Image (spheres, rainbow, N blue to C red):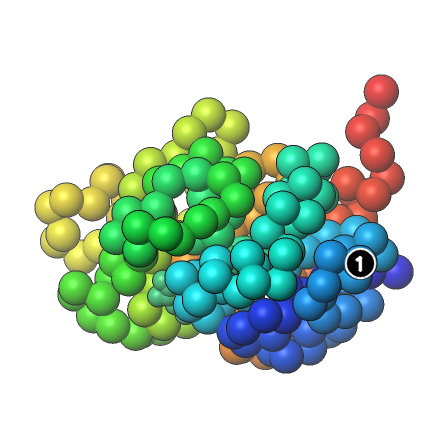
Amino acid sequence: VPQIGVLALQGDVVDHMRALEAAGARAVPVRRASELDDVDGLVIPGGESTTMSRLLDVFDLFDPVKKRLDEGMPAFGSCAGMILLADEVLDGRPDQRSFGVIPMTVRRNAFGRQIDSFETEIGLDGIAGGPFRAVFIRAPWVERVGEGVAVLGRVDSGGDATAAPGGRIVAVRAGDCLATSFHPEVTPDARVHEYFVDMVRSADAGPVE
Ligand code: GLN
């Protein structure tokens, strides 16, 4: 059974732990660097990316997490967690840091200008079983994806002329990193967490040579 950490400084930690367990993993909270040693993957929950960035520094966790990510530890970031995985953040605070492991530009609170929080059904590439009910809470969207980033899901931008064709990007995967603008941990549908647990399992099996 893969052991998956949930960064537990702030945000919806408990929901992610429950969803990971429902998806067949063992979930453990991560609050200090030593707790990273035992995990095969890490979830960075939703919450407030500015606060999480600050707490990562206060708890001396930023560098240890960054090191594991750079070594290839699989990660899944939802909402604020997506922001923390990005290499470029727009509308962030000047002192806000991110791990920069997914080459993408994320705009904070992006939907907020149109609508603060909403739910909609979206299709997700690589996740079978029909549309997924996606819950967006002061969510970011992705404005640029770099090389090697696969777009897994978009939200119809209903007439928003500044959006790319097909709508705003809200789910991406780059190697062993997964990120969603929305919160799959708040719905009973565990498919996104199952997808991530599978990613962790295959990463654990090592590269095929
Ligand atoms: N707006 C938050 C941020 O910028 C993210 C909101 C969320 O995680 N639900 O960090």
- Determine whether 11 is above or below 101 in the image: below
Q: Residue furthest top?
A: 209
Q: x, y (%) of residue 183?
A: 48, 68
Q: Is residue 111 left or right of residue 84?
A: left
**Place of residue 50 in the rendered image (x, y in percent of width and height, measured from the top left):** 40, 62
Q: Is residue 179 visible?
A: yes
Q: Foreground: 110 or 47?
A: 47
User: Which quadrant holds residue 164?
Assistant: top left
Q: Is residue 111 above or below residue 85?
A: below
Name the spot of residue 111 as percent of width and height, x first: 25, 62
Does dot 1 land on a helix, a strand or a loop? helix
Residue 25 falls in image quadrant:
bottom right
Q: Residue at x 69, y 73 (%)?
A: 17
Q: Quadrant of the N terminus?
A: bottom right
Question: How far across and down, in percent of the image, does residue 67 sit?
Answer: 68, 40
The residue at which mark 1 appears reads as 34
Q: Quadrant of the C terminus?
A: top right
**Is residue 61 toward the left or the right of residue 107 in the image?**
right
Residue 142 appears in the rendering:
no
Q: Is residue 67 above or below residue 139?
A: above
**Ligand 1 sits in which quadrant?**
bottom left
